[in-house]
Amino acid sequence: MKPKVAVFDFTGCEGCELNKLNFENELLDIIAHIDFVEWREAMDDKADEYDIAFIEGSISTPECVDRIHDIRNRSKILIALGACAVCGGMNAMKNQKPLEVAREEVYGKDKDLFPTLPALPLSAYVKVDFEIRGCPMTQQEFLRVVTALLMGKNPIIPDYAVCVECKLKENECVYGNGMICMGPITRAGCDAQCPSFGQYCIGCRGLVSHPNKEAMIEILTNHGLSVDEADKKMSLFNTENREGGLK
């Protein structure tokens, strides 16, 4: 029997879900091995229990908190899908301000009508079994994770820098072209897609486990950024890794 799979979205742009719908050559193979039973973007069906639940988006309202606990209770495996679900994503930048200030700036006179909370990753509220990082998530990594689970194995999640993937692909370092790149402290797994196409890494996959932040700030400032600008670059997708500055 094929595993029952559901896809849910919380606070986010739903780009990771859209990226799943963009599978072309692999789509029939995916459907042949798993049974999608609930997915708002693709179908109207609903189910009570799931073998695997993919969750996109951060948690940012009391309703989100209740809903993620409900989904967790009905899922055997829960997978955070994309930067917002894994580390809060760009949504978490609002956490740099007092919540009342953020409410005032966004909602104005209607601020009391929206019970918004700090934007947090799924792991702040429930157990997350696996993570698929990126903004949006990469299709190759999604396939690797799904394939491993179907084979009864734990997916291998990289914990080394994007720079390693760049070197393996023999990419020219984009710093040599005058760009500012977050590759030295950003977790790999995307196959260095952005640098491979002549762009710089913006850090959407979050930090490696033990980033050398001081060295990264030195690299950024040596290439023309102020300390404040460097901190902003480092916190774009990593606000939840801050304690009075990036931690």
Image (cartoon, rainbow, N blue to C red):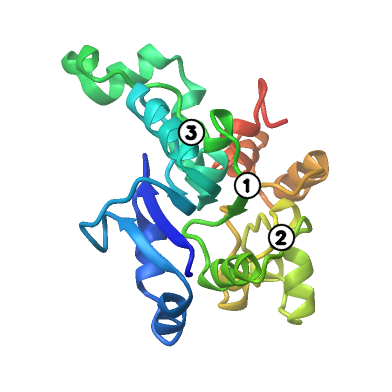
Reply above or below: 221 against 66.
below
Three-letter amino acid code of the residue under disc 1? Asp
Q: Earlier in the sequence, mark 3 or mark 2?
A: 3
Residue 129 circle label: 1
- Whether residue 133 can be seen here: yes
Residue displayed at 56% across by 69% down: 199
User: Which image quadrant: the C terminus?
Assistant: top right
Say which of 80 and 220 sits in front: 80
Secondary structure beneath disc 2? loop
- Would residue 44 appear left or right of 191 to someone viewing this image? left
Q: Are marks 1 and 2 in contact (CB under 8 Å)?
A: no
Image coords of residue 238 (percent x, y): 60, 39
Residue 154 circle label: 2
Residue that badge 3 annotates? 92
Reply above or below: 107 against 142.
above
Crowdedness near tag 3: few (<14), some (14–19) or many (≥20) residues, C-alpha within 10 Å: many
Reply above or below: 146 against 227.
below
Image coords of residue 74 (percent x, y): 45, 41
From the image, state whether disc 1 or disc 3 is nearer to you: 1
- Would residue 241 appear left or right of 97 to someone viewing this image? right
**CA separation in Å, label 1 and label 2:** 10 Å
Residue displayed at 73% across by 73% down: 166
Say which of 60 and 70 sits in front: 70
Secondary structure beneath disc 3? helix
Secondary structure beneath disc 1? loop
